[in-house]
Amino acid sequence: MRLACSPEGTDLPGGNGALRVVLYGQPRQEGEGSAGDSAKAEIQRRRIDPAPKAWDLLSIALSVVTADFAALRDQSPDGWTREIELDIAVADAPFWSGQAAALAEALAFLTTDRWTLRFHEGGILPAPPREPVRPTEDCVVLLSGGLDSFIGSIDLAAAGHKPFAISQTVRGDADKQVDFAAMIGGGLGHLQLNHNANAPGSQEPSQRARSLIFVTFGVIAATALKSYHDGLEVPLFVCENGFIAINPPLTGGRLGSLSTRTAHPEFFARLQHVLDAAGLRVKIANPYATKTKGEMLKECVDQTLLRKEAVRTTSCGRFQRFNYRQCGRCVPCQVRRAAFLAWGAAPDTTDYVYAPIGQDDAEHAGFDDVRSVAIALAAVKAEGAESWLGHALASSFIQDRAALLAMLERGLGELRALHQTHGVK
């Protein structure tokens, strides 16, 4: 599938036959897509002043996330891997053309698709606001409404940081994002942005590219801080437990289709290389790369706030599909439930759709993700973690393999305790 992505009034060469995507505007006619109109409006309303190449990165990320919706996996030859070509208008086409291969490789790792990126002149570069607002926070933290980002924001504030919280507005979590930002550290500076990516026709539900747009929103914010404009490097904290960040394939059938890589260290390392090449002084960091979710809960510095609010957070991969209830049986839900059990400081009163995962039917113990975890636990018991893991930590971008392996074993231990508690066979 091919998409031509540019602001209104910019027609890209060779755009015939491609899906036209209007960046930072609305479709001009039926059959066009769009993305980024509200994000640009909110950035300008807040009078923040991102770096020029951060604007270009936003144009790229918006194009990618729109393609991720528009290209249906079930129409690909193998039912999963897509061929996606993007023609994107940016302000600095020569620079980004030099990064096209690196970006395509990062996206291929993230989404398990084949990407071709071509860059053209004509992208937007808004004039700086007359009286720019340059927030005085010393770092940026992604605040999703999930449990890990909530804990990470608490810990950063308690450690003396002054984080600027950035949220990707998601239906069902937007109000929680506002509430969490207000209650942490005496109140965090907070910016909510929405990609509003829209493509005509059916939309692909897998959304493997979502972390690129979320991190890009963080880069936009980081390059708007006063410290960045003063020439300093700004930390961008993406707080995710190490088990979900690595997300090792639980069984042979989960190699690509069911194991997401939204916070995988290889993706972050590849993206960091692009940021460095662009001269964007933003350093992506996951402080919990070697921690399980249970350990994050146990070690959170504000246990009083955590006990009060933890159950309000969202972990489920199918939250919107179940009318904003957490399913209780997907892998993220199982990791969440195992973490609450390991923590033991507060009951898990989350309203799960499928609570008794030991119940022997297709919706509970027989559901794919519950069975996949059970199979993984049996394989580790029989053959050891190294044999089960296979090549999941073989990447040259991974430097701390021993620590990550130990963390994965502890994470499996938390899941084993959950399955034993529920009697999963």
Image: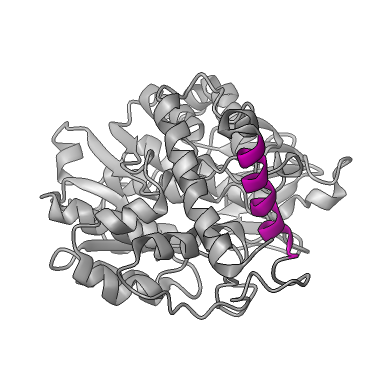
Work out whether residue 86 can be spotted: yes
Find the magenta span and give its range. Answer: 366-382
Displayed quadrant of residue 231: top left
The residue under the point 56% across, 39% down is: 89
- Left or right? Give the position of 47 relative to 284: left
Q: Is residue 277 above or below residue 357?
A: above
The residue under the point 54% across, 49% down is: 62
Q: Is residue 319 above or below residue 253?
A: below
Residue 85 image point, x, y percent: 71, 36
Displayed quadrant of residue 165: bottom left
Majority secondary structure of magenta residues? helix
Residue 378 image point, x, y percent: 66, 46
Q: Residue furthest left?
A: 160
The residue under the point 16% across, 45% down is: 138
Q: Is 55 covered by the magenta stretch? A: no
- Left or right? Give the position of 29 relative to 140: right
- Left or right? Give the position of 359 relative to 413: right
Residue 36 image point, x, y percent: 50, 57
Displayed quadrant of residue 125: top left
Q: Is 372 covered by the magenta stretch? A: yes
Work out whether residue 132 can be spotted: no
Q: Nearer the viewer, residue 226 or 129?
A: 226
Instruction: Specify the color scheme.
Output: one colour
For the C terminus, which image quadrant?
Answer: bottom right
Residue 141 image point, x, y percent: 30, 51
For the N terminus, which image quadrant?
Answer: top right
Q: Residue furthest right?
A: 77
Q: Nearer the viewer, residue 393 or 360?
A: 360
Q: Is residue 335 above or below residue 408?
A: below
